[in-house]
């Protein structure tokens, strides 16, 4: 049986997760989707697309989708759904997990790798984060959860962009890209998003044969990553009153604790040295490492090595062969909370052949 793809939908309170979800569920795409709600809060899926409430906490929807709440923990809920699917009691093709607005997506993502039973039945496809353009500056200043949600994202949708000036949206995107240069970012209007931009993004395969674009760090970061070379001050907890209303600041007003930096090398890596170094780094800094990803030139193989991780979980796989005449350059992006860039760069340099 093929793995069931899963999508994590996250975003701060009021960012429009439910609006997006309702649109995805009611669109005539012919897919049967199981939605796992972290809790049926005030923003639950509206009753017009629900059919009946059952004792099971699993609700059948009029379009063939199903909805359930997490009873005890996510792991048990996922196993329960998979079991019902195997027995033919429920029919669905994919799962969407809507987290609460205050949730850190990290532990939700780790469930798919830490638990063997879940890993054997599901494939975590992507984390999608919604950011509310009107309130984002203040939320990012004040709330670490909001910053972490951005750091974990494989795709960022910016809602309520019509409520603020275009230059504010530009400043917000600029700030978000410094926090996470690997996630595509685009404004969405009332959750109007094509299904292809939500599902099958293949953003999170830790140990899959990934045919990923080696230029996942588009030219955008070439002109602005010089900013990452300066030392950052002690981590402050960003009370937004320090920044006025925070709505119009360019990224340099905010010393966000979620930051990214890019590492490049033109010499190949020594596999043993790199493994030892990364293993040591995740032991120490794993909890602060949100996402890291790379396309590596490794000694001893003519194929690209695709490497990904979340917190202490790391995986790598052989990708496509290096093309004739292609420059064999390793590129890595690290996204995390106050990561020690100098230590990482020094260790990676020492892992080269």
Image: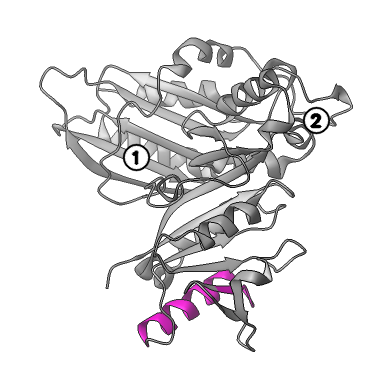
x and y percentages locating residue 266 in the rendered image: 28, 16
Q: How is the image coloured?
A: one colour
Q: Quadrant of residue 115?
A: bottom left
Q: Specify the principal SS of the magenta part.
A: helix
x and y percentages locating residue 212 in the rendered image: 30, 37
Q: Which residue is mark 2?
A: 238
Tell whether position 26 is magenta. Answer: no
Identify the residue shown where x is 19% and y is 29%.
299
In the displayed structure, does residue 306 sit left or right of residue 70?
A: left
Element on which disc 2 rests: loop
Q: Which residue occupies the foreground of this view, 47 or 254? A: 47
Specify whether residue 228 is in view: yes
Residue 292: assigned label: none
Element on which disc 1 rests: strand
Tell whether position 84 is magenta. Answer: yes
Q: Decide: is 14 above or below 339.
A: below
Pointer 2 or 1: first along the chain: 2
Specify whether residue 285 is in view: no
Disc 2 to disc 1: CB gap under 8 Å: no
Q: Decide: is 62 above or below 53.
A: above
x and y percentages locating residue 69 in the rendered image: 63, 73
Q: Which residue occupies the foreground of this view, 353 or 139? A: 139
Q: Decide: is 70 above or below 111.
A: below
Residue 307: assigned label: 1
Q: Find the magenta span and give its range.
A: 67-87
Q: Residues within 10 Å of mark 1 (few under 14, many from 20)?
A: many
x and y percentages locating residue 135 in the rendered image: 77, 36
Quarter of the C terminus within the rendering: top left
Q: Which residue occupies the foreground of this view, 141 or 135? A: 135
Q: Residues within 10 Å of mark 2 (few under 14, many from 20)?
A: some
Identify the residue shown where x is 41% and y is 48%.
204
Identify the residue shown where x is 40% and y is 25%.
217
């Amino acid at each position: 049986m093929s793995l069931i793809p899963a999508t994590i939908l996250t975003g701060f309170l009021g960012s429009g997760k439910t609006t997006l979800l309702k649109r995805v569920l009611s669109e005539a795409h012919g897919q049967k989707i199981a939605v796992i709600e972290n809790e049926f809060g005030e923003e639950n899926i509206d009753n017009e697309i629900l059919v009946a409430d059952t004792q099971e906490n699993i609700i059948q929807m009029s379009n063939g989708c199903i909805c359930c709440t997490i009873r005890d923990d996510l792991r048990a809920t996922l196993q329960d759904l998979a079991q019902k699917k195997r027995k033919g009691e429920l029919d669905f093709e994919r799962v969407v997990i809507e987290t609460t607005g205050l949730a850190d997506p990290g532990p939700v993502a780790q469930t798919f790798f830490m638990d063997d039973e879940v890993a054997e039945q599901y494939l975590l496809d992507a984390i999608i984060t919604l950011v509310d353009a009107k309130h984002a500056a203040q939320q990012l200043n004040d709330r670490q959860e909001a910053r972490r949600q951005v750091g974990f994202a494989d795709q960022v949708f910016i809602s309520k962009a019509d409520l603020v000036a275009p230059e504010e949206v530009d400043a917000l995107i600029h700030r978000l890209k410094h926090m996470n240069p690997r996630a595509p970012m685009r404004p969405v209007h009332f959750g109007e998003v094509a299904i292809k931009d939500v599902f099958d993004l293949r953003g999170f395969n830790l140990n899959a044969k990934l045919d990923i674009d080696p230029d996942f760090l588009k030219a955008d970061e070439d002109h602005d990553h010089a900013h990452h070379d300066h030392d950052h001050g002690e981590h402050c907890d960003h009370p937004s009153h320090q920044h006025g209303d925070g709505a119009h600041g360019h990224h340099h007003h905010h010393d966000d604790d979620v930051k990214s930096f890019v590492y490049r090398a033109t010499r190949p890596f020594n596999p043993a040295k790199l493994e030892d170094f990364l293993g040591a780094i995740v032991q120490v800094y794993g909890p602060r490492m949100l996402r890291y990803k790379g396309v590596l030139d490794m000694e001893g193989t003519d194929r690209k090595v695709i490497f990904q991780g979340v917190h202490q979980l790391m995986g790598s796989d052989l990708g496509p062969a290096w093309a004739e005449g292609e420059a064999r350059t390793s590129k890595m992006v690290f996204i995390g909370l106050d990561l020690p860039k100098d230590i990482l760069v020094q260790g990676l340099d020492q892992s080269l052949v």
